[in-house]
Image (cartoon, rainbow, N blue to C red):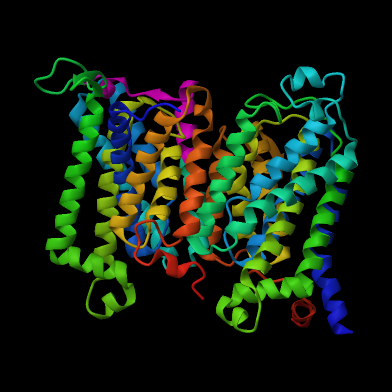
Amino acid sequence: VSRRLDALVQLAGPALLVIAVGVAGSFTSRATEIYFRNALVSVAVVVAIYVFVGNSGVLSFGQISFVAVGAFAAGVMTVPSDVKPGVLPDAFSIIRDNSLGNVPSLLLAALVGGALALVVGLPLMRLSGLAAGIATFAVLEITHNVLREWTKIGPGAGLLSLVPETTDLLQAAIGALVVIGAAFAYQRSRLGRLVRATREDAAAAQAVGVSVHRQRLVAFVLSGTLAGLAGGLYVHMLGSLTADQLYLELTFVSLAMLVVGGMTSLLGAVVGALAISGLTSFLGEAEEGVSVGLRLDLPEGSGLIVVGALMALTLILRPSGITGGRELSLAFLGRGRAR
Amino acid sequence: VGVVDAQTIVDAVGLGAVYALMAVGIGLVFGVLRLVNFAYGQLIMAGAYALAFASEHDWPVLPGILLCFTVVLGLSFVLERLVFRPLRLHSPAVMLVTTFAVAFLLQNVALVIDVRDGTIGEAASSIAGVTLPGDSGSINQAFSLWGLDVRRITVVAIVVAALWLTGLALLLGRTTIGLQMRAAATDFPTARLLGVRANAVIGLAVLLSGVIAATVAVLLTVQSPLVAPDFALRETIVVLVGVVVGGIDRLWTATLGGFAIGFATGVIAGALPTDQTVYLPSAVFALVIVVLLFRPAGLFARGGFASVERV
């Protein structure tokens, strides 16, 4: 009984946080709502990264590649066909002549993300440590370079615009919950335990017959699929996008969210994403002058300085992240009550 | 496919020399702290802003360079004290992401300071237009050498890099503190047991790495005098990749890796047909992946094959 219940508690933490953010967002004005949608899409991106980085313990700087291809796939296929020749003048005819609806485009985004992850993961998952980090970073560079220059598959260096803005608060929340659900199901499954075994001790795992390469690849492809889906949510949230928006800064910020929250737990990924995107939004507003109890009026750009300083401080003082890399558990809750 | 001519090679060596210097700066700190310092580029950026500041206030060139060294070294020691030292016992991932955060922080500090005059970017025009003693043209102009067009700054960069690397090799190879640094880089705990003072070697590594960052700041500012908050960011990323590709565990393989990625970038840029040059990053990074797959411990490291799955 307690194992089932424990699983429920573990899932409930991240899921309730997402639902709470969704509900809170629905009570705010249209102008503020974008911050809540953005926070929820950030959760999807960070949890997708967590599925590989958190479970396998291998640092990847390449997961935003899958967000990017997902976003562009969903974006180019949903631009209304009457304006498409203007937005994508050089595109292949298969892109120019076909259009998808909102949900099919999200599925396509997930598919494209997963497929690219499979192709690059097959050779790359043999690497570990810094070599893996740099090789996955090289994937990000190549993906960005191709998306930015090849006008047959997208807008090139220009703006992908006029994408239907279908990621409202509800879709953002459902998307984040789907990604969390998949991540949770995976980490509770046999496969999830196997890849975690390779993280804790690759030699011991291999000695009992676990293929390190195969288990990492499974995590990588699932992560790529979810990252692609998150990319689809992203493009439908913004409505317009350039390749540069899905590149270095997003990579660093998402990884920072994961590490600040606690790299080895799903709860950590969700908490980190919500904490940093919440803080960034709040300080961004504070630069405009906002009053929350006391009146804050920060000079322009100083919000990001505060975010950077807080991130560095968190990591120095609490290197295992806000959650300590642990999930919510009954024992933890019980201890809280006993005091 | 274009021809890789002597001109391309000269330009590639010039690029490689600057990258090799940056690789040494990153490799020195990695050696003693096991810390991949992503914020290295922001040290260079700070130095470049110092040069722009000096240029704006009509300082002569030498005091400007002195200011650049002061700012970079000061910032290096502040970072060591506030960030690197408390991080020393943390995992590599945490250290790396913390230096991201620091880089992000410094870049935004620069942005806030920079935009006070209403524009982003400051020009360090005085240093870019400087004339070397006994020379007619400015340092950025090219002169003709055996039928090749060589920019003076390219020669300066190669000479300065060669001087620094030789000096460093002598310091590490011929002095007691150099021996201690090499010992610390090989096995820090054992070196400490044998009486190497941790703070001394770390301090020296940070000092040397800072001096190199300031030097690179001067060289890069001369070549591209418009200083913005993302100054040297791209170069730092490429050099970090080069350092790992070369082999980060030892200083000379890291340095060679930095040189190699600069040189390879220059050669590939020259060899790509003109309409394909936009795909230069793809070509370079595809090469990076291939090298890492075959030699994950580093292109120049011993026994690179052995550690594919070192479990």
Q: Quadrant of residue A147?
A: top right
Q: Quadrant of residue B45?
A: top left
- Is residue A312 something one can see in this rendering? no
- Is residue A208 something one can see in this rendering? yes
With respect to residue B303, does A96 lie above or below?
Answer: above
Q: Nearer the viewer, residue B154 or B291?
A: B291
Q: Is residue B115 magenta?
A: yes
With respect to residue A18, does A263 lie above or below?
Answer: below
Q: Residue at x 60, y 47 (%)?
A: A251
Relative horizontal placement of residue A320, taking residue A292 as reference (left or right): left
Q: Residue at x 15, y 50 (%)?
A: B167
Q: Quadrant of residue B145?
A: top left
Count the marks.
Answer: 0
The N terminus of chain A, quarter of image? bottom right
Relative horizontal placement of residue A255, taking residue A174 as reference (left or right): left
Q: Nearer the viewer, residue B120 or B171?
A: B171
The C terminus of chain A, quarter of image? bottom right
Q: Position of residue A6 (x, y in %)?
A: 82, 77
Q: Is residue B78 magenta?
A: no
Q: Position of residue A173 (x, y in %)?
A: 85, 49
With respect to residue B175, does A4 lie above or below?
Answer: below
Q: Position of residue A60 (x, y in %)?
A: 58, 56
Q: Overall secondary structure of the magenta stretch?
A: helix
Residue at the extreme left of the image, as rendered: B134
Q: Residue at x 25, y 24 (%)?
A: B151
Relative horizontal placement of residue A250, taking residue A36 as reference (left or right): left
Q: Start and end of the magenta stretch? A: B107-130
Q: Position of residue A136 (x, y in %)?
A: 57, 52
